[in-house]
Amino acid sequence: MPGADQTRSSTFVICGAGGAGKGSIVAELIQRDPSLWLSRSWTTRPRRDGEPETAYVFVNRDDFEARIAAGGFLEWAQFFDHLYGTPMPEAPAGCDVVLEIDVQGAIQVREVDPGAVVVLVLPPSRAEQRRRMQHRGDSDEHVAKRLAKSDAEEEIGRTLADLIIVNDDLDRAVSEVEALITEHRAGPATD
């Protein structure tokens, strides 16, 4: 719980396949709740056209690998030709950490932090998932590779998640995650 002590905050993992809508949910959560802090992931991939500079910490492969060697990532993975990772979060006092990552990363986070709350975000359909990835500028090859992995990611995510939501209505999806966060912060009903 935030504020319960000076060092411990809760970790909320928003995970799912590419195009599920994780980023949209996280952006809205952060805007609505100032006590949530987004840990920005690192990547070696180039920035997409129109992608905000703040979407990731964009680094070269040597810098990323040096951070791995130093034990500086909570989780990291190679996805196709690029590396992605979440640095060890250092949230401001009184804030809970939000991680926007894939299912593979969520598995690693859960191993390090068994108390992390995991939300699996699913797209309403594969056609919508494809449309979202194309709309954000992903290449046809990248979209095809991501879609090929989606079923396996969903299957694994379902075994890991504390909450599974279909992101077909952003406001409803965000409200479901907010309700889970509120419930988690309240703690168990009896002690």
Image (tube, rainbow, N blue to C red):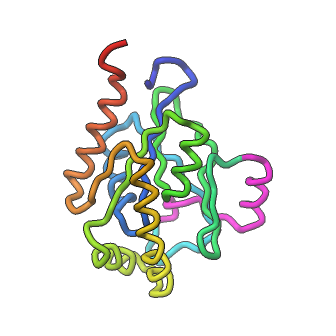
| Residue depicted at 38% across the width and 53% down the height | 120
Please tell me whether residue 145 is drawn above or below residue 2 in the rendered image. Answer: below
Q: Nearer the viewer, residue 156 or 118?
A: 156
| Horizontal arrangement in the rendering, residue 24 relative to residue 157 (left or right) | left
- Residue 64: image x %, image y %? 72, 60
| Residue depicted at 64% across the width and 66% down the height | 78
Is residue 155 found inside the magenta-colored segment of the image? no
Q: Residue furthest bottom?
A: 140
Q: Quadrant of the C terminus?
A: top left
| Horizontal arrangement in the rendering, residue 91 relative to residue 81 (left or right) | left
- Residue 16: image x %, image y %? 42, 59
Give the magenta part as a residue range: 52-71
Q: Quadrant of the N terminus?
A: top left
Q: How many marks?
A: 0
| Horizontal arrangement in the rendering, residue 85 relative to residue 11 (left or right) | right
Is residue 64 found inside the magenta-colored segment of the image? yes
| Residue depicted at 42% across the width and 60% down the height | 155
Please tell me whether residue 78 is drawn above or below residue 22 in the rendered image. Answer: below
Where is residue 186, by image quadrant? top left
Where is residue 187, by image quadrant? top left
- Residue 132: image x %, image y %? 34, 74
| Residue depicted at 44% across the width and 25% down the height | 2
Q: Nearer the viewer, residue 111 or 84?
A: 111
Q: Residue furthest top?
A: 191
Q: Nearer the viewer, residue 29 or 149?
A: 149
- Residue 184: image x %, image y %? 36, 30
